[in-house]
Amino acid sequence: MSKTKTKTLKLAVVGMLYRTDTTTLRRIEKHLPVPCWLVREPRNPNDKNAIAVRLDDPAFPDFKIGYIARDTAAEFAPRLDGKKIEISKSQLCEMDPERGFGEMEISFHRL
């Protein structure tokens, strides 16, 4: 059995101002980088490929901060649903509280 190589990508996180306000985003920004996880939302009425970003930090437990950008989610959702990739690490790295978006880094490998 061959061992698959772990890849790391930076992904845009959007829609943060729909979840909260700039004051809260500034508080979160002070904690960066913040561990997080991705949650598929196949029944999301706005996007069947939606992938939510939830924080995994004691200061902000299970806080849905936003979503992976739609075009990226369209590529990743089928791979996650089909169990073709596994995410081993994800963290929110950068934020722009005033504009309501950020950047996260994920590490994954093919199954």
Image (cartoon, grey):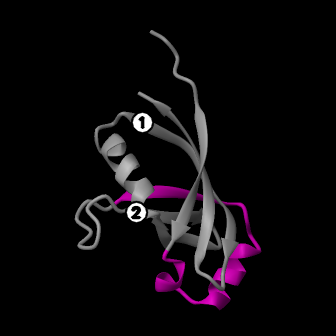
Q: Position of residue 42 (x, y in %)?
A: 26, 59
Q: Position of residue 14 (x, y in %)?
A: 51, 71
65 inside magenta stretch: no
**Is there CB contact under 8 Å for labels 2 and 1?**
no
- Residue drawn at (64%, 81%) of the image: 25
Q: Nearer the viewer, residue 43 or 58?
A: 43
Is residue 92 found left or right of 3 in the rendered image?
A: right
The C terminus, quarter of image = top left
- Residue drawn at (66%, 81%) of the image: 97
Say which quarter of the image contains residue 46. bottom left
Q: Is residue 24 above or below residue 54?
A: below
Q: Nearer the viewer, residue 8 or 19?
A: 8
Tag of residue 70: 2
Residue type (three-letter) at the residue carrying disc 1: Ile
Q: Position of residue 85 (x, y in %)?
A: 42, 36
Say which quarter of the image contains residue 101. bottom right
How busy is the neighbourhood of tag 2: few (under 14 within 10 Å), some, or many (20 plus)? Answer: some
- Residue drawn at (52%, 17%) of the image: 3
Q: Is residue 2 above or below residue 4?
A: above
For the image, the number of numbered tags is 2
How busy is the neighbourhood of tag 1: few (under 14 within 10 Å), some, or many (20 plus)? Answer: some
Q: Is residue 23 above or below residue 84?
A: below
The residue mark sitting in front, 2 or 1, is 2
The N terminus, quarter of image = top left
Say which quarter of the image contains residue 100. bottom right
Q: Position of residue 82 (x, y in %)?
A: 28, 38
30 inside magenta stretch: yes
- Residue drawn at (40%, 47%) of the image: 76
Whole-Å distance between the Cαs marked 2 and 1?
A: 18 Å
The residue beneath circle 1 is 85
**Start-end of magenta stretch:** 15-40
